[in-house]
Image (spheres, rainbow, N blue to C red):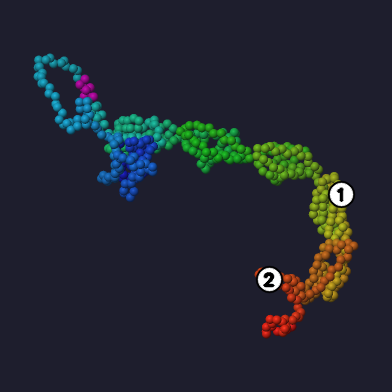
Amino acid sequence: MSDLWLDEPLGERPLAPSESPLTVGGPGASVVIPGCAPGEVHARVAIDGGELRVLPEPGIAAAALAGVSIALEERGDRRVIVVRHGGIANLTLPPELEGRPYEAAGEQADRLPIEIIDYQKRDRAVARPRARPPWPQTARWVAIVAVLLVLAFLLTATAVEVRTSPEVRPDHIEFRGTLLDFGFAGHYLLWPGEYELQVEADGFAPARQPVKIGRTSGQRIVVALSRLPGRVAFDTGGIAATLAVDGAAHGRLPGEIELAAGTRELLVKAPHYAEQRIRFEVTGGGERQELAVKLDPLFAKFSVTSVPAGATVLIDDRELGRTPLETDLDAGRYTLAIVHPQFRRFESPITARAGEPLTIGPVELGLPDGRLIVRSDPPGADVSIDGRYRGRTPLTVSVAPGVPTEVLVTKAGYAPVTQSTRVDSRAERALALELRPVLGEIRVSGEPADALLYVDGASQGSANKVLTLPAAPHVIEVRKAGLETFRMTVTPRAGQPQLVEYSLRTAGQAQAAGLAPRRTTALGQELLLVTGGRFAMGSPRREPGRRSNETERVV
């Protein structure tokens, strides 16, 4: 749109690409028409495919544009959008005649009477006035020349309107490069040409831009002003923090920081504190604002004391210091350990809640544990100390010093053994226990008699015999080549003999024995298991309804 111009009653000016589409309405629009309030827009004007498009605003009646004409004209090497209406225009009205406007004369305006004045001849004898000094005449000529110059300036100068975005009252407007400009309140007269326009306003950075003034009056120049940044004093209550503005790191707090004017997204972060997100309006223009930021702690005041003092404090195996200890602990669940080289280790779960002080102690540390070594014959027995299972023999465990300790050793098939002992601090004591087996009698009998007997996988000779076994579960197996193996788990009982009977079968017999006597199909039909044998099939001759092919026979 570099060759597109606007011609309206206020004058003619070039249009920038950013001005499309043009708004038509009240003050503030690209084209101002009569009868519109400030900020109102009645239509938008644009060039689409070389054609002029006038689009009324939604909800605006067509009558709102009555008396306004908008057209596109070709004037030499440029296109001009021409807007005409009955509002302000640079028109010069005719002078009034005899106290009446010119239009009041109507059709008789060209036939007004001319008053006749009697001519009187000047008397030559009248005394001529005394000669005046030459300087009033010089002053008169100077005044005439000045008036002529002013008139020449007014006739050759162009009317220009200077506006700012955003609209403010500038403190200073200057067209650099011109010998003479005249104006006030944003309206100026100056000769056509190319200048540098400088605009200064309080709270905004000075703006400079080149302008070209044509001969058509009414040219409007809009100067974009950038508001100066402002200074914001952040108060975090003395907590060291970092500041991010609109997602970018911007410095450390507390302190005073310069921020660009406008709405800003602030993010304040500090170790061990909850981050704060703040939407803040920066006034800008060099103004100073204050902002108090309250940071919520994510930790608790944590203190630990012990008897004796000087013990090491561990949190999840991370050393914090020695007792008595006061520090900050982030909120969460931990395992606290208090360790002293000459005393027993103290360990306990703790929970730290943000903002709530947590005090542990004083914790009295006991003497170091003693060491208890437990052995059994046979080995592999289960060991419980003071009612808590600790493992299988041989076993080495730590026990509380100087107090009676109850040791229970058990093993399947053997009588349990209980013994009480005492271990001094830092001492070691060995405990050896012999387990007495509990036996039971198992008699194995069955066919075939020449089958082999196995107990827990170990061969015991022929199958038919009496076994004496510990009172623990045992696997009894009877095997013979070509026959299915018999397998059974038996637990002997003291004083209660038990009988195990077996009968070895072939694979087919074993399969048949495993069949259910009745079975139901997926269709609901009930099937009966028929074992081997003979039966009569068919119908006897004298049976009513017998057919010739239903002869009776043995199957």
Q: What residue type is labelled 2?
A: Gln
Question: Which mark identifies residue 284?
Answer: none
**Which of 42 and 157 lies nearest the eye of the viewer?**
42
List the single residue furthest toward the right: 495
- The residue at 86%/64% (across/down) is 469
Residue 329 in sight here: no
- The residue at 80%/52% (across/down) is 389
Question: Which mark identifies residue 525?
Answer: 2
Residue 476 is situated, as x and y percent measured from the top left of the image, at 82, 68
For mark 2, give the secondary structure: loop
Q: Is residue 401 left or right of residue 217?
A: right
Q: Quadrant of residue 535?
A: bottom right
For mark 1, give the secondary structure: strand
Asked if the magenta segment contains residue 142, the reply would be: yes
The vertical placement of 70 against 105, above or below, is below
Q: Give the range drawn in magenta.
A: 136-143
Question: Which mark identifies residue 421?
Answer: 1
Residue 362 in sight here: yes
User: Closer to the observer: label 2 or label 1?
Assistant: 2
**Dot 2 or dot 1, earlier in sequence:** 1
Q: Is residue 386 left or right of residue 289?
A: right
Asked if the magenta segment contains residue 283, the reply would be: no
Q: Is residue 172 left or right of residue 437?
A: left
* Magenta portion: prevailing SS class: helix
Q: What residue type is labelled 1?
A: Thr
Residue 489 is situated, as x and y percent measured from the top left of the image, at 81, 65
Point out the image quarter for the N terminus: top left
Residue 532 is situated, as x and y percent measured from the top left of the image, at 76, 78
Point out the image quarter for the C terminus: bottom right
Structural distance between the alpha carbons of marks 2 and 1: 72 Å
**Which of 530 and 235 lies nearest the eye of the viewer?**
530
